[in-house]
Image (cartoon, rainbow, N blue to C red):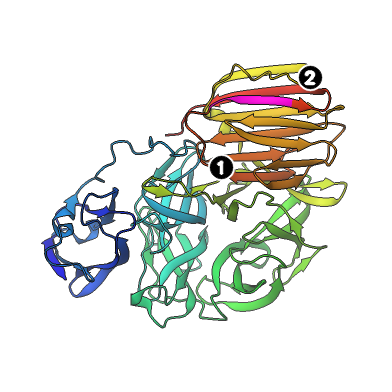
Amino acid sequence: MSREITVVKRYLNLPVRNGATKRHMRLIVDGTAVRAFDIELAEDQPDFWVIANVADFQGRRMAIAVDGLPAASPAWDAIAPGDALRGSEDLYQEMYRPQFHFTARRGWHNDPNGLIYYQGEYHLFFQHNPYGREWGNMHWGHAVSRDLVHWQEREEALYPDALGTCFSGSGVVDVHNTAGFQTGDDKPLVCIYTSAGSTSPESAAQPFTQSLAYSNDRGRSWAKYAGNPVLGHIVGRNRDPKVIWHTPTARWIMALYLDGCWYGLYASPDLKSWEALQKLELPGDRECPDFFPLAVDGDPGRILWVFWGASGTYLLGHFDGATFTPQGEPHKYNWGGNSYAAQTWSDIPAADGRRIQIAWLRIKIPDMPFNQCMTFPCALTLRTTPHGVRLFSEPVREIETLRARAHQWRDTTLRPGDNPLRDLDAELCDICAELAPGNATQITLSVRGIPIVYDAAKGELSCRGAIAPLPTVNGKVRLQVLVDRASIEIFGNDGAVALPVGVVLDPQQRALALAATGGEAHIVSLDVYELRSAW
């Protein structure tokens, strides 16, 4: 069934009811489906509203077609043009809305994509279902920030087409205009993504291939390259291209997931034509590669390359522009299990010099018009340890801009039964501690009812079943803990380990506690910062 309208507003507001019959909707202009997606269209009271952006079709006739929706359904009358999202009065203030971790205003999101820095703005693209709480309809959502803390969500950047829905990928600034997309003074921003064939009715029988989209207005609007795909099907569901500029060889390098635990490296002079360089294995990992150089111990004369998989397994090695040569065995970084598909930003200015990473923090957030969230951005470094060179990750310093009231303790004995935090009542926190276990067998930091346990005998840090090795350094351990409404991110010994834990916290439980078991411990320093909302 279909209805026709003249487009006079920016959006179509669409009513969604969780669990309703999922129907395929197409918005058709001049006989072509300009938008196509599945949606649990509400035929009675909606749980929430979503929007379809139709601003590009102002003044034109549009047919709204919905498979299997009866002509008499009240859903037809509920579909409403508008210039704003209906039901957004409490946007970003909902009960379980994370307050300093990025979430989409509506719908499902997962992998971070296309991370680009350009002219003072961090661009965050993400796998997005704008039309429902569950995975599907993969678009690229888009948000922009000037400080990695405060995000402004923009319109969808990439929509599905006849080649497929839009799976994960990366983004670059084409400084030298190698692809020839530049039309003005701004350098082109280019996103490289997987066209996921056969994941929608419109792309039936298409394989997985790799495609380009570009922007000449600092990411405000996007056009797909007319010659897509730029890399054809290789094997299986090959996907998730990570592209970087390799200055010594003056060409682009792509890391691409192939199949099983196998990845490929490819090279291109112009982002459009690609040649195979190497096939390599990352045992125990798959999907969403990242590939980047880092200085060891901050020494620019000692560079190692990091080849990273979606689950946080990584290889260190050397790259000469054609071949990546691993140095040693794979290492495990992500011990938490709730963090996935981490990616790093391209084109961070040399004056900053950081390698900044963000990941999908997997957590099902109940009863909300959105689902899932991102980790807080972290700065990566390579440091020499007693076990060799390892990757470290710490929250970016911009977290300090949210710090409000501070509570501090110094040089304090922690005896069994003590709780120096007993008078605190806090929802959002940044907790920094340096602790000496002494003769205590365990130290437990409880945040809003969730225990974080340091087992001194085993040298292990644990939270909600996730366990990471964390030996003391000179008899001490250092912790930083970020507490939001749907996550607890724990960093041990200045980022030697990370435990990003997804957990929806009880809004009524705001107590904090620090306790020693089996003997006395020592608080070298303890800082609890209550945080303001980023919204």
Left or right: where 289 falls relative to 517: left
Query: What is the magenta range?
Result: 510-515
Is residue 353 visible from the viewing direction of this image? no
Image height of 207 relative to 528, above or below = below
On the image, the x and y values in percent for residue 528 come to 62, 24
| 442 or 7: nearer the viewer | 442
Q: Residue at x 49, y 76 (%)?
A: 209
Q: Residue at x 66, y 23 (%)?
A: 527
Classify mark 2: residues with Cα within 10 Å, few (<14), some (14-19) or many (20+): some
Indicate the quadrant where residue 238 lies: bottom right
Image height of 284 relative to 186, above or below = below
Mark 2–mark 1 Cα distance, whole angstroms, equals 33 Å
- Which residue was labeled with disc 1? 376
Task: Please give the label number shown on residue 451.
Answer: none
Indicate the quadrant where residue 25 lies: bottom left
Q: Main secondary structure of the magenta part?
A: strand
In magenta segment, residue 353: no
On the image, the x and y values in percent for residue 326 come to 78, 66
The residue furthest bottom is 205
Is residue 21 visible from the viewing direction of this image? yes
- Which residue was labeled with disc 2? 415
Tell me the element at label 1: loop
Q: Residue at x 41, y 36 (%)?
A: 95
Left or right: where 435 falls relative to 103: right
On the image, the x and y values in percent for residue 102 come to 47, 44
Q: Amino acid at mark 1?
A: Phe
| 12 or 416: nearer the viewer | 416
Q: Amino acid at mark 2?
A: Arg
